[in-house]
Amino acid sequence: MAWWNWFRKKSVPPVPIYFLRQGSNGSAVKQLQHCLNLAMARKRVKEDGVFGKETLLALEIFQVRSHLKIDGVYGPLTADALERRLKEKTKIKKIGT
């Protein structure tokens, strides 16, 4: 199942499984940007597939809020925290509807 089909199933979107950092680009970065937009309350990241300053800032804010090491690198620990956050938000929406 492609990652963008998660919406049809109304489940948690899969998070990228790659190491990503500033300068990375492509579909994995676009997927990360989408997941960050879903997980964050205010900061909106342009979903363009380019890991630039805006994506770096959003990722670092997410790392701070998740009590992770603030390194600006999307790796396994950040991926786990992002997946947990998206699952929490999905539960909250289901309860609230």
Image (spheres, helix red, strand yellow):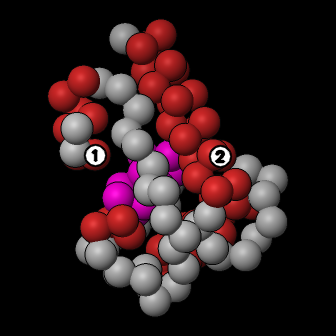
Which is more N-terminal, label 1 or label 2? 1
| Secondary structure category for the residue under label 2 | helix
| Secondary structure category for the residue under label 1 | helix
Q: Mark 1: which amino acid?
A: Trp
In front: label 2 or label 1: 1
Height in image: 8 above or below 76?
above
Q: Mark 2: which amino acid?
A: Ala
- Image quarter of residue 97: top left
The stretch of residues the image draws in magenta is 31-41
- Image quarter of residue 8: top left
Q: Are marks 2 and 1 in contact (CB under 8 Å)?
A: no
From the viewer's perspective, is 31 left or right of 92?
A: left
Between the C-alphas of marks 2 and 1, the distance is 18 Å
From the viewer's perspective, is 85 left or right of 17?
A: right
Height in image: 95 above or below 22?
above
Taking the image as drawn, is residue 28 in sight?
yes
Q: Is residue 47 magenta?
A: no
Taking the image as drawn, is residue 37 in sight?
no
Query: Whole-percent x and y of residue 82?
Result: 57, 47
Kindly identify the residue that appears in the image at 76 percent across and 70 percent down: 70
Residue beneath disc 1: 3
Kindly identify the residue that appears in the image at 64 percent across and 56 percent down: 76
Along the viewing direction, whichever of 16 and 38 lies nearer the viewer: 16
Callout 1 crowding tier (Cα within 10 Å): few <14, some 14–19, many ≥20: few
Query: Whole-percent x and y of residue 77?
Result: 70, 54
Query: Whole-percent x and y of residue 29?
Result: 38, 69
Kindly identify the residue that appears in the image at 28 percent across and 46 percent down: 3
Q: Which mark is residue 81?
A: 2
From the viewer's perspective, is 9 left or right of 20?
A: left
